[in-house]
């Protein structure tokens, strides 16, 4: 795969400098668009490699640059096709290790199997832990990720993990919309990050109590805890998968007298039938980020995609330069405002 990313970023502010030239940025096939935008932010180009599948479904990888002693960042969310994305990630890490890279950072903006993070019934695996072990064993030195299903997944790794969040970006988008009488709605699992989201919007928080029906994708909503009547709601979550949770939440909020409902999530997994559910719902807008690519068939006028490329790019720049990434968790940072100037194609608006 060869990069066509421009050698200056969309703002034109950061010229390619020597420090960025020494960042070796690569992508697998999971989300090359995002990787290209990250490269544009950094004022660099994607490294050259071949990553393809043989007729027998075995994956072949060849790194086409000399990466000996280099600082390698490999962008590969483990999104659909999930098993293939995971294998590409692992095989590419192995290729970099055997090519004597100095340091390998697995940049995994979306971490699959995050919901399998505990043994909550007899004889089930903890697949999120297994994936963490595989990434480490393959040879990654560190991991850069975003809005894990649960922060504790960081502890499944014995290598450094930087977990970014899209909460500041998503909240800033809604701040700019200036929606009145807001309430933020979430489930228990996302409550802590939703609290931060609600504070940024100066809105109260309501919690939905839900349970899964057996081990199926279907969510059943039990209660809405908090005052929502007569308000406009933003439903916030780490991911929208089949849209079952979202649809149940929208129905419950409508029953409770909410008259305008928005939804947002870091990861737009949007497995079938999420798109049908969103189109048939009364949702005013659904806002997601580009941690996972959105196929043309899933583009709806009501679905807005914000790019996290500047956030990830900035984290990479700081990791490479040995700077703190702590500032990237601040809603004050200018970068959040800048990110909203990027349209879906990664061009400055
Ligand atoms: C689960 O707890 C997550 O936070 C999301 O609520 C869930 O992944 C959404 O899945 P679905 O859209 O299939 O209901």
Image (cartoon, rainbow, N blue to C red):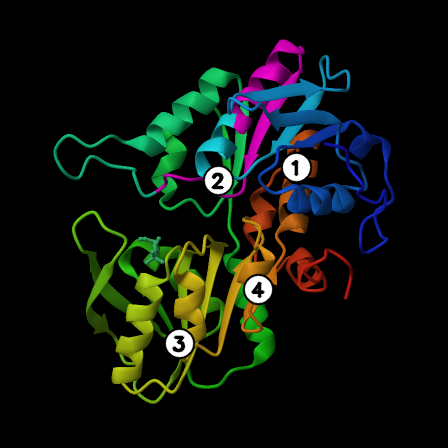
Q: Residue furthest left?
A: 122
Callout 1: CB less than 8 Å from ligand 1? no
| Residue indicated by mark 1 | 316
Q: Residues within 10 Å of mark 2 (few under 14, many from 20)?
A: few
Between 173 and 195, the one nearer to me in the picture: 173
Alpha carbon of mark 2 to alpha carbon of mark 3: how far? 27 Å
Vertical relation: 14 (above or below) 190: above
The quadrant where ligand 1 appears is: bottom left
For residue 348, above or below residue 269 = below
State the separation of the CA atoms marked 2 and 4.
18 Å
- Whether tag 2 and tag 3 are in contact, CB under 8 A, the answer is no
Q: Residue placed at 63% from the left, 17% from the top?
A: 96
Q: Examine the rendering and report whether any part of residue 110 can be seen.
A: yes
**Badge 3 local density, few (<14 within 10 Å), some, or many (20+)?**
some
x 68%, y 18%: residue: 62
- Marks 3 and 1 sit apart, C-alpha to C-alpha, by 38 Å
Of tags 4 and 1, the one toward the viewer is 4
Q: Which residue is mark 4?
A: 299
Part of the protein shown in magenta: 88-114
- Which residue corresponds to the image point at 53% horizontal and 39% vertical from the top-left? 77
- Residue behind mark 2: 81
The local crowd at label 4, few if under 14, some if 14 to 19, many if 20 or more residues have their Cα within 10 Å, is few
Instruction: Examine the image and state in which quarter residue 339 appears.
Output: bottom right
Q: State if disc 1 and disc 4 touch (CB < 8 Å).
A: no
What's the CA distance linking mark 4 and mark 1?
A: 29 Å
Disc 3 target residue: 281
Q: In this figure, what is the number of numbered marks?
A: 4
The vertical placement of 291 against 225, above or below, is above
**Which of marks 4 and 2 precedes in the sequence?**
2
Farthest front residue in view: 55
Quarter occupied by residue 314: top right
Looking at the image, residue 296 sits to the left or right of residue 82; the answer is: right
């Amino acid at each position: 795969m060869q990069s066509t990313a421009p050698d200056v970023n969309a703002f034109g502010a950061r010229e390619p400098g020597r420090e960025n030239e020494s960042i070796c940025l690569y992508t697998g096939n999971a989300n090359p668009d995002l990787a290209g935008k990250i490269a544009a932010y950094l004022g660099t180009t994607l490294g050259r490699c071949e990553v393809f599948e043989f007729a027998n479904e075995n994956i072949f990888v060849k790194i086409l640059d000399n990466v000996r002693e280099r600082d390698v960042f490999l962008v590969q969310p483990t999104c659909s096709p999930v098993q293939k994305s995971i294998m590409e990630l692992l095989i590419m890490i192995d290729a970099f290790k055997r090519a004597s890279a100095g340091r390998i950072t697995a940049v995994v903006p979306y971490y699959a199997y995050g919901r399998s993070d505990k043994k909550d019934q007899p004889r089930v695996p903890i697949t999120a832990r297994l994936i963490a072990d595989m990434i480490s064993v393959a040879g990654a030195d560190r991991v850069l990720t975003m809005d894990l299903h649960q922060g504790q997944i960081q502890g499944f790794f014995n290598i450094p993990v930087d977990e970014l969040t899209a909460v500041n970006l998503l909240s800033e988008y809604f701040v700019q919309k200036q929606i009145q009488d807001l309430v933020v709605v979430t489930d228990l699992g996302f409550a802590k990050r939703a609290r931060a989201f609600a504070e940024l919007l100066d809105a109260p928080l309501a919690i939905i109590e839900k349970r899964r029906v057996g081990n199926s994708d279907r969510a059943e909503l039990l209660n809405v805890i908090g005052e929502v009547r007569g308000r406009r709601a933003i439903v916030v979550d780490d991911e929208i998968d089949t849209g079952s949770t979202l649809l149940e939440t929208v129905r419950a909020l409508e029953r409770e007298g909410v008259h305008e409902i928005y939804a947002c999530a870091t990861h737009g997994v949007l497995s079938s039938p999420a798109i049908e559910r969103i189109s048939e719902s009364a949702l005013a807008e659904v806002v997601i980020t580009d941690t996972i690519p959105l196929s043309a068939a899933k583009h709806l006028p009501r679905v807005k995609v914000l790019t996290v490329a500047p956030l990830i790019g900035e984290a990479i720049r700081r990791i490479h330069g040995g700077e703190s990434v702590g500032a990237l968790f601040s809603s004050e940072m200018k970068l959040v405002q800048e990110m909203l100037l990027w349209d879906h194609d990664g061009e400055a608006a």
